Amino acid sequence: MAECDAEWELCKENIQPLRQGRTISALHQALCQQQEGNQTALNQKKQAFESELRLYDGDDPLDVWVRYIKWTKQTFPQGGKESNLSVLLERAVTRFTADKKYHNDARYVELWIEFAQGIGTLQAALYIAWSEEHEKRGNLKMADSVFQDGVKCGAEPADKLHAFHRALQARVCRQMMSSMTDQQRDEDDDDEGPADPQRSSLAELKARGKKKAVVPINRVSASAGYARGLQFKQPLGPKQNSRLAIFDENKAETEPQEPKFEIWMAPPTARAKENEQKPEKWSNVKLPLKSRSGLSVTVPPPKPSFQPFVEEDDQPPTVTPCKINPAVNPVLSARKPCRPEQTPLKKLQERQQLMQLQTQEDGKSREQSMYCRELLDSGATEFCFEELRAERYWQKHTH
Amino acid sequence: MTGANEFKLTQGPDDSVSAVKFSPASAQFLLVSSWDCTVRLYDVSANSMRMKYQHLAPVLDCAFYDPTHAWSGGLDNQLKTHDLNTDQDTIVGTHDAPIRCVEYCPEVNVMVTGSWDMSVRLWDPRTPCNAGTFTQPEKVYTLSVAGDRLIVGTAGRRVLVWDLRNMGYVQQRRESSLKYQTRCIRAFPNKQGYVLSSIEGRVAVEYLDPSLEVQKKKYAFKCHRLKENGIEQVYPVNAISFHSVHNTFATGGSDGFVNIWDPFNKKRLCQFHRYPTSIASLAFSIDGSLLAIASSYMQEQGDISHPADAVYIRQVTDAETKPNYRHSDCAVIITVIVKVVVPVIIAVIVTVIMVIVAVIVQ
């Protein structure tokens, strides 16, 4: 046990925190088992849970899942792939979707919360909350891209989303503007308002406010802020320009005639210096791939102009642990390995699509599996007939 | 139902049959392991049980090491060897979970066991003792030996090819080319490849050589499906056995049918009558004259009542097991005749006629 205490001290950083905490004894046990490389007990326990999932005939099947998941979390403090937790959660959550009984069961909802990194993707509320979170942390770019994602996904209600998006842009503009004015005041000494840059920026807002008769701190339809935002953002990149053009249609006519237009032409270039690109060969330049947010521009890492020195006798070992010739390996695998960076929602969607496809196929060819397919599929890992039968055998012969 | 070329073994097991294996020396002896916790040795020619030994739990597989030694393992996690001369048991070792497969590799002289504890263990049959434990990525469901190579089929549709002479690494990691759970893998007697069957009425013929042109030859086909009222019922394919001489193979499904296939011409050679219940295991005798057929319900559809379990011994003929080359030869000859001989004859006749006409005109 003493070594295990040391063990716990040594791998603290590898232990994922759990909301409900960890029992120290389970942690000790898990760490000890891992240290010894003793997988047998784990596998046996896992197998026991799996067979219980299939052979349970009480009136609370969720209980088995909850215990299984709880055990998994306690036993694999590092998380990771071998814990199989994401698969477990997914299976547990999808299994009882049709079961009205569990819809308001606290345990089931908790499973959903844990699983759901992708729930509510069609709700404007999600994007609003998400974006506000980004904004709070000062990541305005992300906040904006979150809104764009929302629009792209067609989140409802759309007008609410747009309203909040505009409000965000207004806030961003105001912020930028104030910083711009600061800058300009610093640069241009002959400007008439060297006394207080803050005040002048407010004055401008007032001037705009006259037209619309709105208070300077305008959260919804800040036409002034918005219009300036357009001017500011233009030099930042073609993507943004085209994106903002969508919102142009409302007030495109009035804004360009703004008196301040010329004045604000200068600062953006100064601002854009930050992102200025170095002169380079144009023929080699590739258009950035269309990224999800539409904002990030991927710049391929430059190739080193020098040849890394490799010692001549530094040959790779002739006996590698994996003897598969990479050239011929693809021939042997029929499918691509699944990508680990998939989100739970994506997996769920793919699974549903697959199921739909399968049911369509089944409908077409009208196939019927002549074995207990549901039973074999109902756990997180695969079972065969013999394993099920063995479980039944032990149930019969131990009681 | 059983004709002159087939009979049912008397004194059969009391529960489902898990495996049938013929002796490597003669077609006379057959090992039968069963869920009734026994392994039985039958004298097929006399249709009598010669010997029987017990495990602590149901036995999932058995194999001959030599004509006088049987090896078996099952739900009790124990690997046993039984001397068939002295009727003596020895526990060779254990796995951490039930032992699903037992095979003998004569090339390397080693017994191989695969278990649900996600490992394959090798055993030296002479001592006998453990000769190594090799972790697999998943529970082992089936394995087969092709010369000095070991083909392991696990859960998660994985197939691993090991070199029994050098178990330091996995020679090939493959994925089953079939979409559903792997039920059985058996290697070609010519060691070129293996046949894999899945839980959803499909069989794949695969080759071990990873080169592109060889891999192009692999294929899969549907079988063990019955059409009933417009619905195609798909049955698991539980058993495969190769004819050691002709390299043809028999498959047995939960539909109760046994088919014999010619993998080279991609043809079915024959189908036997329907057996009372699922085919759990198949075994050709070493000379290829007999086929042992275990018709035994495997609880594929739950623990329900079912026809009695039985082992049938069937005499098979060359017509049923030999690739039918004569047929294709005929076809080749006919096409040659049509394409070459006929035009030549016509040409000859035409020239003769023209010569005659020319002579008459002159």
Image (cartoon, rainbow, N blue to C red):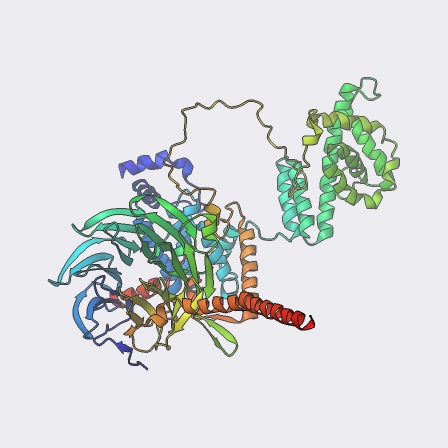
**Front one among A224 and A209:** A224
**Front one among A245 and B176:** B176
Q: Is residue A105 left or right of residue B40?
A: right
Number of callouts: 0
**Front one among B269 and B31:** B269
Q: Is residue B258 left or right of residue B5?
A: right
Query: Is A317 above or below relative to A352?
Result: above
Q: Where in the figure is residue B33, as x and y percent of width and height?
A: 25, 66
Q: Is residue A215 left or right of residue A350?
A: right
Q: Where in the figure is residue A161, as x and y percent of width and height?
A: 70, 49
Q: At x 73% / y 31%, what residue is drawn? A: A176
Query: Is A159 above or below relative to A358?
Result: above
Can you see residue A195?
A: yes
Q: Where in the figure is residue B126, as x and y percent of width and height?
A: 17, 51
Q: At x 43% / y 44%, what residue is drawn? A: A79
Q: Where in the figure is residue A81, as x and y percent of width and height?
A: 44, 46
Q: Quadrant of the N terminus of chain B?
A: bottom left
Q: Is residue A13 left or right of residue B93?
A: right
**Front one among A153 and B300:** B300
Can you see residue A221?
A: no
